[in-house]
Amino acid sequence: MPELPEVETTRLGLLPHMQGQHIQNVLLRRDNLRLPFGKDFKAQLNGRDIKTLHRRGKYFWADLGNQNALMMHLGMSGSFRIEDQRMKADEYQKHDHAILSLSNDKQIIYNDPRRFGFMLYIEDVERYEPFLRMGPEPLSNHFSGPVLHTALHKKNTAIKIALLDQSVVSGLGNIYVCEALYITRIDPRRPAKTLSLEECEALSTAIKQVLERAIKAGGSTLKDHQQVDGELGYFQHQFNVYDRAGQPCQACNNPSHLIERIVQGGRSTFFCPKHQK
DNA sequence: CGGCAAACCTGCGAGC
DNA sequence: TGCTCGCAGGTTTGCC
């Protein structure tokens, strides 16, 4: 799924339906996703008020007050949708795993074919373990060229791999890393520590730009991602390199310069070896 | 610590 | 039609 723009799109779509409501019922159609919901999950959520929804990297959560939270992660194939009507047992779709019924009579339905996502009740969101080692929010002022340069300057690993490391910068995944490196003409295979401060400035700017544009487009819809209202994101139509192996590099102005697919860290990287140095 | 492979799952498209 | 294979937006674990 779901990299930062898809998570943010989901959060923004759910917000008007969930903010200020309270949870009247929790229905679980299985007892675990990637992680177990937890033995007391239903009791911990029933009757609780949802103050608002927050996001950090690819995680988002319902703020239940007093630092308590319903933490959510979409994994690779998770999505939410809203239903206005109470659903009968035979009306659920395949892979509808968790349903929250709210005081506004809306049902918030989590669907996740691969079940790499999760929902957890968290007592103290400030001490949630994944957040403690998470790098800066890329769209905040905490992320900049100098910050990125410092984070990378000892890393021998390829810049592509380093940017996927959520402790360097949070929220990036395979698509937006490929796109940001293409925009800045940086070869994804270069050791991270070889990037100059100027390159890190350009890269941090490109990361912000590509994420902001993707959020405006409602995220990217490959197979699974859809917005809460069922609309599909359309940023995939603006990809320069992702999933474009064999197609001409648009920036090279030479039809024989083709986008290549290589494997780094077991995952596909798309880039133009002529354009990116 | 670094680097890499495998694990967790289902679905889809390509090729035979 | 149906089989197998490889691939998919993420994260964690375990091994060398």
Image (cartoon, coloured by chain):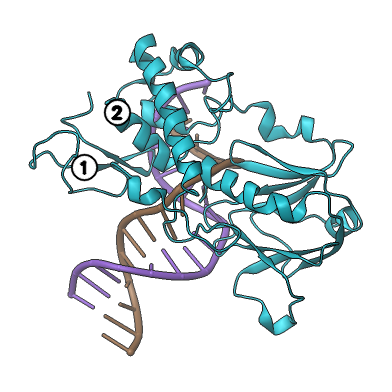
Chain colours: A cyan, B purple, C brown
Q: Is residue A265 above or below residue A81?
A: above
Q: Chain of mark 2?
A: A
Tell me the number on the disc at residue A163: none
Q: Looking at the rendering, which quadrant does residue A68 occupy?
A: top right
Residue at 68% over, 48% down? A72
Can residue A196 be seen in this snapshot? no
Considering depth in this image, is A277 or A180 the residue closer to the camera? A180
- Label 1's element? strand
Name the residue beneath numbered marker 2: A189
Residue at 64% over, 42% down? A59
N-term-proximal mark, 1 vs 2:
2
Tell me the number on the disc at residue A260: 1
Label count reads 2
Considering depth in this image, is A268 or A66 the residue closer to the camera? A66
Q: Give the left or right position of residue A206, taking residue A68 as reference.
A: left
The x, y position of residue A56, in whole percent, is 64, 35
Q: CA distance from mark 1 to mark 2?
A: 13 Å
Considering depth in this image, is A190 or A137 the residue closer to the camera? A137
Location of the C terminus of chain A (image quadrant): top left
The x, y position of residue A37, in whole percent, is 76, 56
Q: Are marks 1 and 2 on the same chain?
A: yes
Q: Give the left or right position of residue A127, taking residue A202 as reference.
A: right
Q: Is residue B10 above or below residue A51?
A: below
Q: Residues within 10 Å of mark 1 (few under 14, many from 20)?
A: many
The x, y position of residue A190, in whole percent, is 30, 23
**Amino acid bearing label 2:** Arg
Residue at 83% over, 56% down? A41
Residue at 42% over, 23% down? A205
**Amino acid bearing label 1:** Glu
